[in-house]
Amino acid sequence: MKKILMVAYRLIGGSFLFIVCILAMIVLSSRLSGGEPTILGHQVKAVLSGSMEPTFKTGSIISIKLADNTTKYKKGDIITFQKDQKLITHRIISVVNENGNVSYKTKGDNNDGPDLWKVSSQDVIGKYANFTIPYIGYAMNVANSKVGSALLLFIPGLLLFISAVRSIIVAAKDLETKKSQLS
């Protein structure tokens, strides 16, 4: 039973450390680059509202495939777009082509009616890439704050310091044990 608890403790601790390191990498790379971190043409975004439930839950993170000048979207696609300095992710309910200018009528899956605006193709950031992880978005939002960024730098350093002190204490006890056995 003790071994099972020790394995569980190490798995939980290792998972926590892994998540903290990944969040630190994301935050630091976005701070250094001045923009959002992009991996193979994809970005990770946090879901901040329930407008797209049950497709994604509030607090999830989603991956979006970034748009380029040739990207075309169709009815049913889920897109992330810029509206009034905010990012919104909603489903396309119709494609509007007016004099060669393409725009999209959108709606959140959980909303009663369509959005009151049309989204121009220039405002589209990208398309949902069918990848989501629940609840990590809450941690990502905290990590992107000033306090969260500072903690992401402080916590791994503190954990490394504690690990080093623990190793020194264990080594000192082992040395004392060996000395007492030799006497």
Image (cartoon, rainbow, N blue to C red):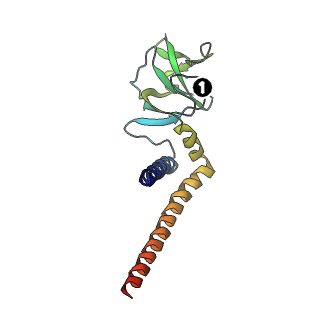
Query: Looking at the picture, how far across and down is residue 133, in whole percent?
Result: 47, 34
For mark 1, does the 10 Å Cα neighbourhood hold few (<14), some (14 to 19), or many (20 or more) residues?
some
Left or right: residue 13 versus residue 117 is: left
Tell me which residue sits at (53%, 22%) in the image.
Answer: 54
Quadrant for the C terminus in the image? bottom left
Tell me which residue sits at (50%, 16%) in the image.
Answer: 92
Query: Looking at the picture, how far across and down is residue 49, in whole percent?
Result: 61, 28
Query: Looking at the picture, how far across and down is residue 76, in whole percent?
Result: 46, 15
Whether 76 is drawn above or below 66: the answer is above
Query: Looking at the picture, how far across and down is residue 130, in whole percent?
Result: 42, 27
Q: Secondary structure at mark 1?
A: loop
Whether 50 is drawn above or below 139: the answer is above
Q: Is residue 98 visible?
A: no
Question: In the image shown, does 68 or 11 lie closer to the viewer?
Answer: 11
Residue type pointed to by label 1: Gly
Left or right: residue 116 versus residue 5 is: right
Residue farthest toward the front in the current orientation of the protein? 1
Residue 2 quadrant = bottom left
Question: In the image shown, does 130 or 102 lie closer to the viewer?
Answer: 130
Question: In the image shown, does 92 or 160 lie closer to the viewer?
Answer: 160
Identify the residue position indicated by label 1 in the image: 50
Question: In the image shown, does 104 or 47 lie closer to the viewer?
Answer: 47
Whether 153 is drawn above or below 40: the answer is below
Tell me which residue sits at (48%, 73%) in the image.
Answer: 169
Q: Is residue 41 visible?
A: yes
